[in-house]
């Protein structure tokens, strides 16, 4: 059965047990009408989902246990953190550590009565009224995921790691739903990773909403290094009030098909949005970044920097849209997308898109596509640095300004190691 | 140390070196001079192993073995150092890290452990002093935003820390004002030992006032057309290259 029909029939069977029934019904109606996008849809022009959508996926996993040993490799261990582990969408309290006095870290289902009111208020608040098929499907059927609530002026004392693990005997379609609400003057750092622990194919449709209130600071790091059986459509929506700062960094190394939809809505003045990414992929991989920064009010700053390195026949897509609405005077919006193609078969379709309807703004965008510089390679090799290491050094140097901005030291180290492994050199080079 | 015989090389169909013979023994300083386009930089690139150049004939031996089939990094590991005429800017790689990687990769190739961090730092500080290099230099991105003089000084700084057997200085004097030239030349002189050798490639005699060569060779149209001692350099400075070119052309007729 086609994924769309499968989801609709699952919804009809389970409606009685679901929260937010009215909202879910509306979303599923939309999915019924619209269906999943094809390459005729401008937003999906370079990423063909049809082979994936025709596959037979199970919606319920049959495996329900995972050990700490399995998880260990995929989490930060030397840094003191909070940890939430989900397996096939089910929270694993025995592997998690979420006990926190000042903030509320739980799952959407397990939240207490008071927190349920907050969930009720913000669940779906960052999403557009008419979302695309993936948002609709997630709205309709996703039930569980991380819920993080930072009350006013609370600074979370250590970072939170969220691991969405999957493990199944057969191909699995899974949907996660995360909600992060950071109240006035509060701060939080979060890392997130989706990881498959089996040989079966997994297709994930994730929705994360991040609500950032006045003076709050949020750093959200996405580590995408899943195995080659996995595909993901990762939808992240951020609403920012005034004077706040939100960063979403996306590190894409793994997975077969990775589509990131990242949207920032600047709703309050004097706020800052940062989105950065490193994409380093190889054989038969596709990573598609679609970002949108919606400048609705004056005096905000958005900074976007995506770097991509494509090897073998890897395919990259970057579509960065910046909308500056008529009221959004004094907007500063900067966007840059730089790419290295290591082979003739690798490709990148990059499309910076600025739509400016205000007249007193500073906006810039630029994209570059190039190869490793032969002169630079010779220079390094003439100093005794072997070809492979010299190439690695140039690639690190290329990606370095993105890595440099990471605030969690161990994460920076871990990403260095992943990059070294991907490039095939022994050690991470500190630059 | 270095023995070049009948070396012919070029890029694609363009023959640049048309039969070079050159022998450099340890302890010696050789100057290679010549007008623009004579093949000076090609010669240095070919010795260092730049892959763009095709070697069509002849041989290059270093310490008695052929290096013709070796990669640039393998030649560097043997102790051949090329100071670039135009050092490449590499944003994102710091000077200190570049030198550290360079030293440790060379040690690795020789089966040695990486140099301890303290020792490495001491070595770099010592050489910075020798070349009058300011603090903060080590953490800058390699050659990025460096002035012409800073780039050249950085090349000699690398030379000093790597201590190669053979240093080839390709137009190290270009872009250096007289004060910087003195510092650089003084550094090169202090690095001289009876065990290493230097090839100075230059267009002008000026640098040779400070680095006194044992031999001077004139490269013209892909061949060494005249060799002599340091007096030859003075003659070239005074009379230019035309008289040699004329001499060569007369011989051909």
Image (tube, coloured by chain):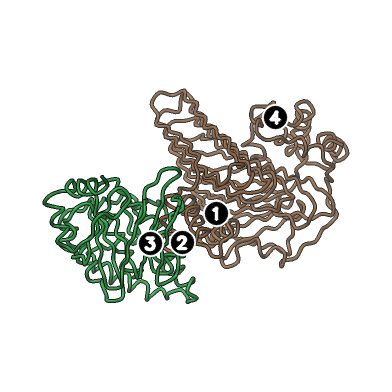
Measured Cα–Cα span from mark 1 to mark 3: 65 Å
- Residue under pointer 4: A39
| Quadrant where the C terminus of chain A is found in the figure | bottom left
- Residue under pointer 3: B5
Structural crowding at the residue carrying mark 3, measured as other residues with C-alpha within 10 Å and reported as few (<14), some (14–19) or many (≥20): some
| Marker disc for residue B68 | 2
Residue A116 % position (x, y): 69, 46
Mark 1 or mark 3, whichever is nearer to me: 3
Q: Which of B136 and A360 is in front in this view?
A: B136
Mark 1 or mark 4, whichever is nearer to me: 4
Measured Cα–Cα span from mark 1 to mark 4: 36 Å
Where is B198 relative to A393, above or below? below
For label 1, the SS is strand
Q: Colour of chain A?
A: brown
Measured Cα–Cα span from mark 3 to mark 4: 63 Å
Chain to which mark 4 belongs: A
Q: Which of A195 and A330 is in front in this view?
A: A195
For label 4, the SS is loop
For label 3, the SS is strand
Q: Residue furthest left?
A: B238
Q: Chain B is drawn in which colour?
A: green
């Amino acid at each position: 059965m086609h994924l769309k029909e499968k989801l609709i029939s699952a919804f009809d069977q389970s409606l009685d047990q679901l929260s937010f029934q009215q909202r879910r019904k509306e979303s599923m109606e939309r999915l019924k009408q619209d269906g999943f996008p094809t390459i005729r849809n401008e937003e999906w022009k370079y990423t063909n989902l049809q082979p994936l959508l025709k596959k037979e996926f199970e919606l319920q996993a049959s495996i329900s246990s995972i050990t700490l040993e399995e998880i260990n490799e995929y989490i930060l261990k030397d840094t003191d953190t909070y940890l939430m582990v989900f397996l096939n969408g089910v929270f694993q309290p025995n592997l998690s550590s979420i006990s926190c006095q000042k903030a509320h870290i739980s799952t959407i289902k397990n939240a207490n009565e008071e927190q349920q009111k907050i969930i009720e208020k913000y669940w779906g608040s960052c999403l557009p009224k008419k979302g695309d098929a993936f948002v609709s499907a997630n709205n309709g059927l996703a039930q569980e995921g991380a819920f993080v609530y930072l009350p006013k002026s609370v600074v979370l004392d250590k970072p939170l790691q969220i691991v969405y693990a999957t493990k199944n005997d057969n191909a699995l379609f899974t949907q996660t739903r995360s909600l992060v609400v950071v109240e006035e003057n509060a701060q939080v750092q979060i890392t997130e990773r989706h990881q498959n622990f089996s040989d079966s194919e997994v297709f994930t449709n994730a929705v994360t909403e991040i609500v950032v209130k006045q003076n709050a600071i949020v750093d959200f790091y996405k580590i995408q290094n899943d195995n080659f059986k996995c595909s993901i459509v990762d939808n992240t929506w951020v609403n920012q009030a005034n004077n706040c700062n939100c960063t979403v960094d996306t590190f894409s190394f793994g997975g077969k098909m990775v589509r990131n939809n990242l949207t920032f809505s600047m709703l309050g003045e004097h706020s800052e949005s940062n989105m950065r990414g490193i994409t380093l992929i190889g054989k038969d991989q596709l990573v598609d970044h679609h970002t949108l920064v919606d400048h609705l009010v004056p005096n905000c700053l958005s900074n976007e920097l995506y770097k991509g390195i494509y090897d073998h026949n890897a395919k990259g897509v970057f579509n960065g849209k910046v909308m500056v609405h008529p009221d959004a005077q004094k907007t500063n919006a900067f966007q840059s997308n730089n790419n290295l193609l290591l082979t003739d078969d690798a490709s990148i379709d990059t499309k910076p898109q600025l739509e400016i309807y205000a007249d007193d703004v500073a906006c810039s965008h630029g994209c570059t596509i190039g190869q490793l510089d032969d002169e630079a390679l010779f220079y390094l090799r003439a100093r005794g640095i072997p070809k492979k290491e010299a190439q690695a050094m140039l690639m690190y140097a290329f990606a370095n300004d993105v890595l440099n901005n990471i605030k969690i030291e161990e994460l920076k180290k871990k990403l260095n190691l992943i990059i070294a492994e991907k490039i095939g050199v022994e050690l991470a080079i500190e630059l | 140390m270095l023995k070049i015989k009948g070396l012919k090389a070029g890029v694609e169909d363009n023959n640049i070196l048309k039969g070079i013979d050159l022998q450099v023994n340890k302890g010696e300083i050789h100057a290679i001079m010549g007008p623009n386009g004579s093949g000076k930089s090609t010669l240095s690139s070919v010795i260092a192993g730049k892959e763009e150049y095709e070697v069509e004939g002849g041989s290059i031996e270093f310490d008695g073995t052929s290096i013709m089939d070796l990669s640039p990094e393998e030649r560097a590991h043997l102790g051949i150092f090329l100071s670039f005429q135009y050092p490449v800017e590499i944003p994102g790689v710091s000077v200190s890290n570049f030198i550290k990687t360079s030293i440790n990769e060379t040690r690795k190739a020789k089966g040695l452990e990486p140099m301890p961090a303290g020792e490495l730092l001491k070595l770099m500080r010592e050489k910075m002093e020798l070349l009058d290099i300011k603090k903060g230099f080590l953490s800058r991105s390699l050659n990025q935003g460096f002035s012409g003089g800073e780039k050249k000084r950085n090349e000699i700084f690398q030379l000093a820390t790597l201590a190669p057997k053979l240093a080839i200085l390709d137009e190290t004097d270009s872009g250096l004002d007289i004060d910087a030239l003195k510092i650089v030349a003084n550094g090169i002189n202090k690095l001289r030992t009876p065990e290493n050798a230097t090839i100075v490639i230059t267009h002008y005699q000026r640098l040779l006032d400070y680095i006194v060569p044992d031999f001077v060779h004139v490269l013209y149209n892909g061949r060494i057309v005249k060799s002599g001692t340091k007096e030859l350099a003075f003659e070239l400075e005074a009379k230019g290259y035309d008289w040699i070119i004329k001499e060569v052309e007369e011989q051909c007729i």
